[in-house]
Image (cartoon, rainbow, N blue to C red):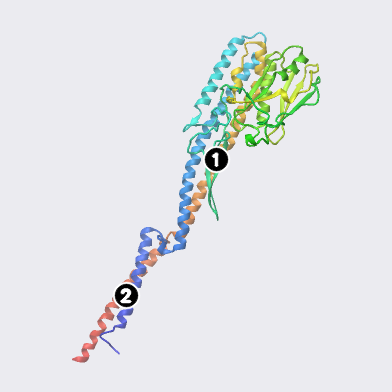
Amino acid sequence: MSSILTNTSSMVALQTLKSVNMNLSKTQNEISTGKSIATARDGAAIWSISKVMESDVKGFQQISNSLSLGQSTISVARTAAESVTDLLTDIKGLVVSAQEANVDRAKIQTDITRLRDQVTSIVNSAQFNGLNLVKVAPTTTGATNTIAQQIVNTNTAGRVNVLSSLDRSASGVTAAQIQVNRSDLATGDQTAGTVAQSATTIAATAFGSSTATIAAGATVSVALDGDATTTERGGNRVLAGDTYQLADSFYDRLSAALGTAVTGPTSYVARAGDTMVDVARNLADRANFAIASAGFADQFVAGFTDDGDGTAQFTITNNSGAAGAAAFAATDFVELTGGTAGGGLELLGDINVSTQNGARAALSVIDSLITTATNAAANLGSAQRRMDIQAEFVGKLTDSFKTGIGTLVDADMEEASARLQALQVQQQLGIQSLSIANQAPQSILALFR
């Protein structure tokens, strides 16, 4: 049956043409945008996943910038630490030469002073974008050493954190950071505190005592445990600005064996991030310096051992040949507040080889200063190496993310090109088919002639 009111063939041809045109439009969009999923309408789930991954890529690009800034900052600090190590090695050579009796110590001291000034200059200038990792600002009790830098997240204990990654989990995204320990190589002097800690402020077991007299040839140990349980101090063993002191009574026990006075006290002001091991090491260095300055180098030798839990043993070895007066008491160690920490190479300013005793005293501490500098260079080198590895990983991870996003949303251009040609042919055929269908009712006119 033919009808001039309803042309079924034309309807079918029209619908087919519309479908072809729609597919053709989609294919043309894929070719022009390069994406098979360009909007949420094209595939909501895939589009959503790709957008989350794109946001992560943007985040990792910023992390790469952060790592680059961190690498540059650490590189400057490491170079400075290595240069300081070389200068301290030169100073040691001068100190050794000053041990001779027939040398011009005044000229040697002049050379040492110039090298020391160069150390100070290097440390002061070793900053990148305003951040100096080898010079820590002096701290006092209760103070937080905070420096506003874009790569620094926290700096509460002589550390800086460099943004290194984004960790995504089911609960959300968290930032991961690489912690870099600051290494203080400054030569500034400390200021000892003057306010004694009360019994209600520090733990009764902060300092131990020995049970034996300082016998000839013997080594005596004293436990330095610090304030581990005191509520008022937040359970911290060491606070920046605390002054730890070897009292006069400590030197009285040495003087009894030597038969002449060795004077004290010797003080060390804790820096941010210190443990009791750091306190013990620095007290030992200062005790050896004081003993050598009095002309009794090697007759009593101070040292320390690490207990492995942030506490330490302070040791003294009696090489004088005579017994000390008594065992060490807890009162030989004094804790004060209100001090200002000095630099990590503070004792460099006390080196004076103008006299024989001064030369021997310098020899007792120069190795410790070199160790401080080499440790700083090693720590910074290790941190820089880790940052280099992380930067390389972030670069590869970003590329992998981009590849994954492309797999999800990018159009297959070869397929799109072939489909475009096929759809163009289908469009032409659809137009021709619709034209034929529209002309079909004209054949009915022949019936009425």
Q: Quadrant of residue 210?
A: top right
Q: How many marks?
A: 2
Q: Nearer the viewer, residue 188 or 354?
A: 188
Q: CA distance from mark 1 to mark 2?
A: 62 Å
Name the quadrant of the C terminus: bottom left
Name the quadrant of the N terminus: bottom left
Mark 1, mark 2: which one is toward the viewer?
1
Are there few (<14), some (14-19), or many (20+) residues within 10 Å of tag 2?
many
Q: Quadrant of residue 2?
A: bottom left
Where residue 301 appears, as percent x and y from the top left, is: 73, 21
Question: Can see residue 314?
Answer: yes
Left or right for 217, reference 434 = right
Residue at which label 1 appears: 387
Question: Can see residue 99?
Answer: no
Are there few (<14), some (14-19), or many (20+) residues within 10 Å of tag 1?
many
Which amino acid does the dot numbered 2 rest on? Gly
Image height of 405 relative to 122, above or below: below
Q: Which residue is rendered at x = 63% and y = 13% of the image?
A: 353
Image height of 217 relative to 375, above or below: above
Mark 1 lies on a secondary structure that is helix
Q: Quadrant of residue 260?
A: top right
Residue at which label 2 appears: 430
Which amino acid does the dot numbered 1 rest on? Met
Image height of 77 relative to 191, above or below: below
* Circle on res. 298: none
Where residue 171 appears, as percent x and y from the top left, is: 55, 54
Mark 2 lies on a secondary structure that is helix
